[in-house]
Amino acid sequence: MRFQKSSLIALAATLTLSGASLAQEAPLRVVATTTIVADIAQNVAGDMLTIETLLPPDTDTHAYEPTIDDANRLAGASLLFTVGAGYESFIEGLLENVGGDIPVTELNQGVEILAFSGDHSHEGEAAESAETAEEHGAFEVLGVLGEGLTCGEHAHEGEEEHADEEEHADEEHAGEACDPHTWMNPLNVAVWAQNVADALSAADPANAEAYAANAEAYIAELTALDAELEALTAQLPEDARVLVTNHEFMGYFAARYGFEVAATVLPGGSTGAEVDPQALSELIAFIQAEGVPAIFAEITANPELADIVAQDAGIQVVSDLYSEALSDASGPASTYIDFMRYNAQVIVDALSG
């Protein structure tokens, strides 16, 4: 059988259009760094695609070391969602090893960032009067990420242009690092959801309306969650809303719901930080003087130091909080919303006594 030239052209055009259609219909491969990021992204993605996760449930992100399997899973991804603000210290090296140009969306873009409150040195604080106690609850706002503020190098935008003579001044403020644990306030996660919708819509315009609708619905759930947590924590009198934690990760929760982060066992925002014996002695004296009832530790962290401090101070360690990751499906914090409800209830129960 002989085809006419026009028939061959039509057939070629049909095959070309079919190939383009198949390419367009190929689903995005979207990867998230943590289970918390993945759950939030999945709520926005809905049924359009499945979000893959690098870190498994019940994982301490601060102690995470990427594997070859992680690099293989990340290779070929259409989009990567991260917390940002300097949180995933491993991600730059992992992306370099993977190669290619994977678009990265930092969900903390557009979020108001707090500073870590410092080293929580308590020398002499045991003698402070009740009138000065509120000073512990101060939270320093560094700015909005992406709007004149960058994190990761503990520097504001443009600081790299400073002259050499200003380097020592910058070092003096190196402890004022960005606190990336913004998800401890559901209203910040509402910003995350919108960032996810924008990124997915840009990568997959055909489903942009669905992503926008899913984000709107999820943001409504987050707003309701915030009201629920506000009512729950309001059951505690203000002078009972005092937190001592294993490491510094509750700042955004405390700032939103009127708590005071009075001290941490480990300095800073990493579970890998080191502490000296003198600091532990000062912390014990501070806890006893202030009448703090409990130290809150994370399920994913080693509570050994917290246990030592609590035993010497004569208080309990509540090691049931989730901080860096969700639980598995059978646990009490398998979604972000359950994660927040569970943590808030554990805190209120521990401080109510």
Image: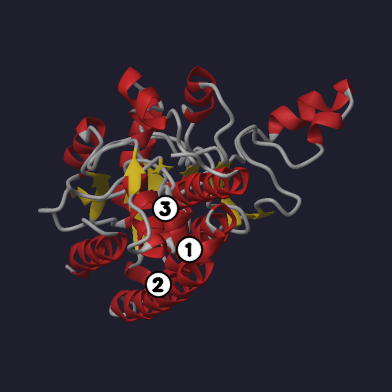
Give the labeled residue for mark 1.
Answer: 193
First in sequence: mark 2 or mark 1?
A: 1
Give the labeled residue for mark 2.
Answer: 218
- Asked if the residue at tag 1 contacts the one at tag 2, i.e. Cβ–Cβ closer than 8 Å, the answer is yes
In this view, the mark in front (3 or 1) = 1
Farthest front residue in view: 1
First in sequence: mark 2 or mark 3?
A: 2
The structure residue drawn at horizontal position 29% and vertical position 77%, both measured from the top left corner, is: 232
Residue at mark 3 to residue at mark 1: CA–CA distance: 31 Å
**142 left or right, relative to 338:** right
Above or below, 224 against 203 in this view is below
Residue 306 visible in the shown view: yes
**Alpha-carbon neighbours of circle 3 within 10 Å: few (<14), some, or many (≥20)?**
many
Three-letter code, disc 1:
Ala
Q: Secondary structure at mark 3?
A: strand
What sort of colour scheme is used for the picture?
secondary structure
Residue at mark 2 to residue at mark 1: CA–CA distance: 8 Å
Of the 4 image quadrants, the one containing the C terminus is bottom left
The structure residue drawn at horizontal position 56% and vertical position 55%, both measured from the top left corner, is: 199
- Asked if the residue at tag 3 contacts the one at tag 2, i.e. Cβ–Cβ closer than 8 Å, the answer is no
Q: Position of residue 39 (x, y in %)?
A: 33, 55
**63 left or right, relative to 183:** left
Give the labeled residue for mark 3.
Answer: 262
